[in-house]
Image: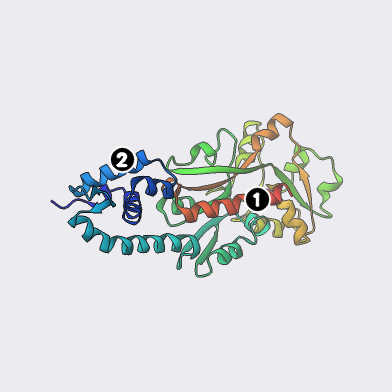
Amino acid sequence: MNKQLHRLDLNLLVILQYLVEERSVTLAAKRLSITPSSVSKSLAKLRQWFDDPLFIRSPQGLTSTPLMHRIEKSLPEFLNLANYIADIRDTEKPRGLKFRLMMEAPLNLIMLHDLSLKILNQYPESNVNVRDWDYNSLASIVAGDADIGVLGRESYHKSKESINALPDILNFEVLFIDRPLAFVRTGHPLLSEKWDLTNLLKYPHISTEYGNRIPWAFDDVLHSMGLTRNIQLSYSSFEQSLLMTSQSGHSLLTCAPGYCQHYVNEFHLDLVCIPLPLEPEIYQQLDIPFLMLWHKRNAYNSKTRWLREQIKSGIANFVNP
């Protein structure tokens, strides 16, 4: 009856080759840096597998049986091929890999602007696809249509966009925790008034969708206080909201994660960034944990693991320069 190869420990074949070369359990053990007892146990397993003694003791050392003579002809070729395959893994980069990323904008432009080049340098013949995070992105990761997502979630306990609402089939890691700020254009009348909720809420707002919601945790907190924002305009990304807010000739303002202040500075937007006028215990409820998430099926995938390390490193170098 033919035996299945996957039931054989292929490391035993390496030991078998050393036995062929040395014709001695003791000398084979010395070359392998293991004990003679370990070699003897391995030989016993090989004898059981092949149902043959393989070697017979003689004054000249171990002598091959007829079956072992047949094995000796093919064994070096097999081991050379195995070594060649192992070397390919270590020295040659796989070709044709596809990297599919879903990332919140403008976080990807600020903290991970060089990630695509890092991927192409590491895997020159790969294909990199980066898309802004939207309400379909989570479904793409669940379905296996994207490798990794980088996004902010809400910590407010009633939010549908909280970490607790993520599907169980996804793994995630918190990269950093942020807090929203108000972004007001220079010359806005609000900047000459008392900085409090009453004045903040009397002006119209631009909102940015979180998931598929135009109101987000800030609006939920305001609702619990009997207050509301007058949202007159909404966009799908923070960069769109910030660019619109920076234009002159209107009284609109917006709220966005604090990291967006770097985007404002880098692109010289005419905006003032101010913490929201909330009590500390209320403000804390608006903390935004920024996550990297991936499907559990890719937890030990070498490509995904490498990519996760690059993202963590890029974020850490930006947050803690």
Relative horizontal placement of residue 83, taking residue 52 as reference (left or right) = right
Whether pointer 2 and pointer 1 mark residues with C-beta atoms closer than 8 Å, the reply is: no
Q: Which of the two residues, 247 or 88, is positioned nearer the viewer here? A: 88
Residue 52 placement (x, y as % from top left): 18, 48
Q: Secondary structure at mark 2?
A: helix
Q: Which of the two residues, 98 or 257, is positioned nearer the viewer here? A: 98
Relative horizontal placement of residue 43, taking residue 27 as reference (left or right) = left
Q: Secondary structure at mark 1?
A: helix
Numbered badge on residue 59? none
| Up/down of 129 relative to 36, above or below | below
Please name the residue that numbered disc 1 is placed on: 315
Figure quadrant of residue 264: bottom right
Residue 202 placement (x, y as % from top left): 74, 43
Relative horizontal placement of residue 50, taking residue 295 as reference (left or right) = left
Residue 128 placement (x, y as % from top left): 52, 65
Q: Can residue 207 be seen?
A: no
Please name the residue that numbered disc 2 is placed on: 41
Figure quadrant of residue 243: bottom right
Residue type marked 1 = Ile
**Which residue is at a point 68% across and 34% down the rendered structure image?**
284
| Up/down of 12 relative to 279, above or below | below
Residue 87 placement (x, y as % from top left): 45, 62
Residue type marked 2 = Lys
Q: Which of the two residues, 155 or 119, is positioned nearer the viewer here? A: 119
Q: CA distance from mark 2 to mark 1?
A: 50 Å
Furthest residue toward top: 281
**Which residue is at a point 53% across and 39% down the rendered structure image?**
163
Q: Can residue 72 be seen?
A: yes
Nearest to N terminus: mark 2 or mark 1: 2
Mark 2 or mark 1, which is nearer to you? 2
